[in-house]
Image: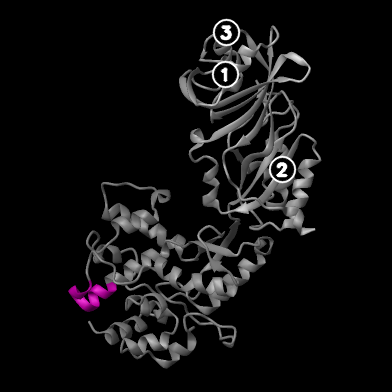
């Protein structure tokens, strides 16, 4: 089978020049200049057909062409310049302008008629050219691949966007008037071609077509009783059923300081009843979320660990990240970030800094090696009798040591009962000024250590504990997190925008 013979037959079947190149197995940039590609392949196409159709990528300089009287029998006009124009206009008329994403990705749902017509043409080519057309290997570049090679670059160029798999997703649902009739015929064909499998209409899927409908499994004579070979050209092009937009997932990171001893990490509910009116998560999302998305409740808040309700987090704060789906904005100016930081600060309960958009893949930093991180604490601890020099000396521990810690009773409702080994890296105690019953203890521990239980021992469930080390009862009155060993996200000073 020579290229010219193939093209002449395809032309006689009402196949457009782009689809002719598909059947010539063109790849990549070969679709950009049809004339040049046909010349390289040694093919001459009727001039009137080239004049009626686009040269692959349409340009603003090309004059408007008269509407075609019929559309390609295999692609139903999906590669025509008229359809490209309709598609671009449809995207622009949607909410496309609300999103500032630099990149886009297309998800195009095409009618099953396109697969049926590919199969019809496959049968037709076998009849025309015999065994040179294989029964198990399609004779064309799949239309899905051609759409990616041709339509995607055109749409990106027209919309002045780059392709980005993580960018704004434009979901396009295409339909054609012939689809309902052709799929009904397919249901009838299926009962005859595969009598052991009685499928309902809804079970006829694209996957089924790809898997079962090949010349090696269905006879052309059987197929032709229900659907024509070759497929006929059509008077109407594809139509846009819907265009849906899904903004990218944007990650906003920063560090928070918890200033209140009466604030939960996330909304605290017991048996459906709120225990506190606010939380760290809600305060931050309330100030940051609305700028990025209308679906604020779908934002996910993550942090590098968490504090108890009555524990403050000071110093440089605790790293956190917001995963914001369907985001309208993919960037954050310093001015806007500063306004968000100031809005959170006004709560008087939480303060944030270093607010910035980070690449999605970096968000995992917050969980990577979580138990290997070091945490720095300052605990205010009470004795039942005045501290002695011996007690202070026993709580000066510069070398690391290990403890065994059972899940505390206070968290058994949300944590399984386990005994966990934890490393204490250093302990340094001093008397609180003018109060010999109170010690200020600086502690460096492995992440995941329960500090309150490390102090009092919880009836021997944590061993050793400070109480067992000094041989006397000791309890914790207040606790602050003063440092977290995670150098992320990068430091930024959003106030420099002023």
The image quarter in which residue 23 lies: bottom left
Residue that badge 1 annotates: 454
At horizontal 75% and vertical 57% (from top left) the residue drawn is: 496
Kindly tell me whether residue 237 is visible in this rendering. no
- Tell me, what colour scheme is on the image? one colour
Give neighbour class at mark 1: few <14, some 14-19, many 20+ (Cα, 10 Å). many
Q: Is residue 262 above or below residue 46?
A: above
Mark 2 vs mark 3, foreground winner is 3
Q: Please tell me which residue lies in front, 260 or 155.
A: 260
Residue that badge 3 annotates: 471
Q: Please tell me which residue lies in front, 189 or 40.
A: 40
Give neighbour class at mark 2: few <14, some 14-19, many 20+ (Cα, 10 Å). many
Q: Earlier in the sequence, mark 2 or mark 3?
A: 2
At horizontal 20% and vertical 75% (from top left) the residue drawn is: 132
Which element is circle 1 on?
Answer: helix
Cα distance in 3D space between marks 3 and 1:
14 Å
Magenta stretch containing residue 409, yes or no? no
Cα distance in 3D space between marks 1 and 2:
29 Å
- The N terminus, quarter of image: bottom left
Residue that badge 2 annotates: 352
The image quarter in which residue 320 lies: top right
For residue 409, side relative to residue 8 (left or right) = right
Q: Earlier in the sequence, mark 3 or mark 1?
A: 1
Q: Is residue 215 above or below residue 388?
A: below
């Amino acid at each position: 089978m020579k290229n010219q013979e193939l093209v002449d037959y395809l032309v006689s079947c009402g196949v457009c020049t782009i689809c002719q190149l598909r059947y010539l197995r063109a790849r990549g940039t070969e679709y950009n200049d049809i004339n040049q590609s046909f010349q390289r392949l040694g093919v001459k196409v009727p001039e009137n057909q080239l004049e009626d159709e686009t040269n692959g990528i349409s340009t603003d300089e090309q004059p408007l062409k008269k509407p075609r009287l019929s559309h390609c029998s295999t692609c139903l006009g999906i590669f025509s310049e008229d359809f490209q124009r309709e598609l671009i206009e449809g995207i622009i008329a949607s909410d496309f302008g609300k999103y500032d994403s630099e990149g886009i990705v297309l998800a195009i749902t095409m009618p099953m008629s396109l697969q049926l017509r590919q199969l019809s043409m496959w049968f037709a080519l076998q009849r025309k050219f015999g065994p040179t057309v294989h029964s198990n290997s399609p004779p064309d570049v799949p239309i899905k691949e051609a759409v990616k090679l041709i339509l995607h670059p055109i749409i990106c160029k027209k919309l002045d966007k780059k392709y980005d798999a993580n960018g704004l997703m434009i979901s396009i649902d295409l339909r054609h008037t012939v689809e309902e009739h052709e799929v009904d015929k397919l249901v009838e064909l299926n009962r005859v071609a595969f009598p052991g499998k009685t499928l309902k209409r809804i079970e006829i899927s694209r996957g089924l077509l790809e898997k079962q409908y090949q010349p090696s499994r269905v006879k052309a004579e059987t197929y032709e009783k229900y659907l024509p070979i070759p497929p006929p050209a059509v008077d109407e092009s594809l139509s846009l059923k819907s265009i849906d937009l899904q903004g990218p997932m944007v990650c906003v990171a920063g560090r928070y300081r918890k200033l209140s001893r009466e604030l939960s990490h996330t909304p605290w509910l017991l048996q459906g009843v709120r225990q506190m009116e606010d939380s760290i998560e809600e305060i931050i999302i309330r100030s940051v979320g609305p700028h990025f998305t209308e679906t604020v409740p779908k934002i996910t808040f993550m942090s590098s660990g968490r504090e108890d309700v009555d524990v403050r987090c000071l110093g440089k704060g605790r790293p956190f990240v917001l995963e914001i789906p369907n985001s309208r904005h993919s960037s954050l100016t310093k001015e806007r970030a500063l306004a968000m930081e100031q809005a959170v600060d006004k709560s008087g309960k939480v303060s944030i800094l270093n607010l910035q958009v980070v690449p999605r893949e970096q968000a995992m930093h917050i969980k990577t090696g979580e138990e290997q991180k070091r945490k720095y604490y300052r605990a205010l601890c009470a004795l039942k009798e005045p501290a002695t020099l011996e007690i202070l000396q026993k709580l000066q521990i510069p070398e690391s040591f290990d403890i065994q810690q059972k899940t505390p009773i206070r968290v058994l409702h949300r944590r399984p009962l386990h005994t966990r080994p934890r490393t204490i890296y250093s302990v340094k105690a001093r008397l609180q000024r003018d109060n010999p019953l109170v010690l200020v203890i600086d502690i460096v521990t492995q992440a995941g250590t329960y500090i309150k239980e490390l102090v009092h021992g919880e009836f021997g469930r944590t061993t050793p504990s400070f109480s067992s080390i000094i041989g006397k009862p000791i309890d914790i009155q207040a606790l602050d997190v003063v440092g977290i060993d995670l150098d992320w996200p990068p430091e930024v000073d959003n106030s420099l925008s002023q």
